[in-house]
Amino acid sequence: MFSNKNILIAQGGGPTNVINMSLVSIIKEEKKLKSSVLGSLNGVRGIINNKFKNLNKISENDLKVISQTPGAALGSTRDKPDNKYCLEIFKVLKKKKINKFYYIGGNDSSDSLRIISEHANKTGYKLQCIHIPKTIDNDLVSNDHTPGFGSAAKYVAQLFSGINYDVKSLPGVYIGVVMGRHAGFLTASSALLRQNNNDGPHLIYLPEFSFSYQSFLEDIKKTYIKHGKCIIAVSEGIQNKNKKLVSQEISKTKEYDAHGNIQLSGSGSLGDFLAQQIKSKLKLPRVRADTLGYPQRSFLGSTSEVDQKEAFEIGKFAVKKALQVSHSFSAGIEERKVLSKPYKVSFRINLLKDVAGQTKVMSKDFYNHKQNFITKKFINYALPLIGKNITKTKSII
């Protein structure tokens, strides 16, 4: 059990619609405990550069507005600290007499906390490192789902629902390339608002199974013959049978982000390449492709009220749990054993080593045996997370 004195909060990785909900809930709870709360600007980089902000001075009204604002209010970073970098972070935390360090982020953020915590343990310095989960990719292990995913899934679902009516009006072939890296949850969410089998998306391709150009083209041809149109959701992380990224196959140069990961987003090359394959091989009219990009992370109109509430509550949970245990941990969302109504959420804590640097992918019962669409079980899993504030739609034709 740690007494609350000097607290530090930082945000890392890609921003989301609800990351600031967690930030504000931690600030509010720690202020109740009379803690001195600092924020590190631009994630762990702010610690190294000694850029901090006193968060105790933020008014309640401003906190309310910040909580509903997308993007990381403290600024984020793509830095992926190694052991040496983490040691420097620890030195600054020790110098500033930080007792608790909350880091809101994904896989890499949890790994940074693991290393920092190990440095503290080796020296006997009392520091509690607390990871607050956040990622639209929904790829954190030991979590049913992650804050940020529900709102991003809502955006993807609504976008494809809108595209469905567009293509229904002027039939053709549409490809939407969706974020998610090596996990297909976000791409699979494209089907959450389908009302019948004639609605798109008609085909979904995920990183969890091997992508075949031949099967891809055959599926599209059959779908177009049946429906007179074809809407396709494709994950940015699709890979061939040799586990090589398709985006890497078609690119002459490899780009990497600051975490050392191959850059999957930022260009429309994958969608454009697949569209060209359809045009040249199938000779179908009106073939279009879009890469969804950053709006998946921070589009104001797609915030899920369920996602907002859970992001806020998991911050509160983490503060209260930190008073009950003395070790570092990652706050998490308890996995649902039964996907039943009404939807309920519960929280848990995980050891940092059990979450850090690992990737969760879609379970096999979330997609069909043909590996070109998702199952009802995935719908039951993801639909409650996007909330109920969805515009109702209906077509005459």
Image (tube, grey):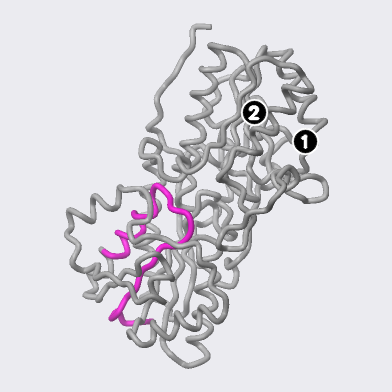
Q: CA distance from mark 2 to mark 1?
A: 17 Å
Which segment did they paint magenta? Answer: 1-27
Whether the magenta-drawn stretch holds residue 12 is answered as yes
Q: Position of residue 231 (x, y in %)?
A: 62, 24
Q: Position of residue 16 (x, y in %)?
A: 43, 50
Judge left or right: residue 74 versus residue 173: left
Between 209 and 179, the one nearer to me in the picture: 179
Residue 369 is marked as: 1
Q: Earlier in the sequence, mark 2 or mark 1?
A: 2
Residue at position x 62%, y 32% from top?
233
Q: Position of residue 141 (x, y in %)?
A: 59, 59
Between 384 and 132, the one nearer to me in the picture: 132
Q: Residue furthest bottom?
A: 123
Q: Under tag 2, what secondary structure?
A: strand
Which quadrant holds residue 50?
A: bottom left
Q: Under tag 1, what secondary structure?
A: loop
Looking at the picture, does residue 97 appear above or below residue 22?
Answer: below
Task: Tell me the residue that label 2 is attached to.
Answer: 232
Between 211 and 385, the one nearer to me in the picture: 211
Q: Residue furthest front?
A: 252
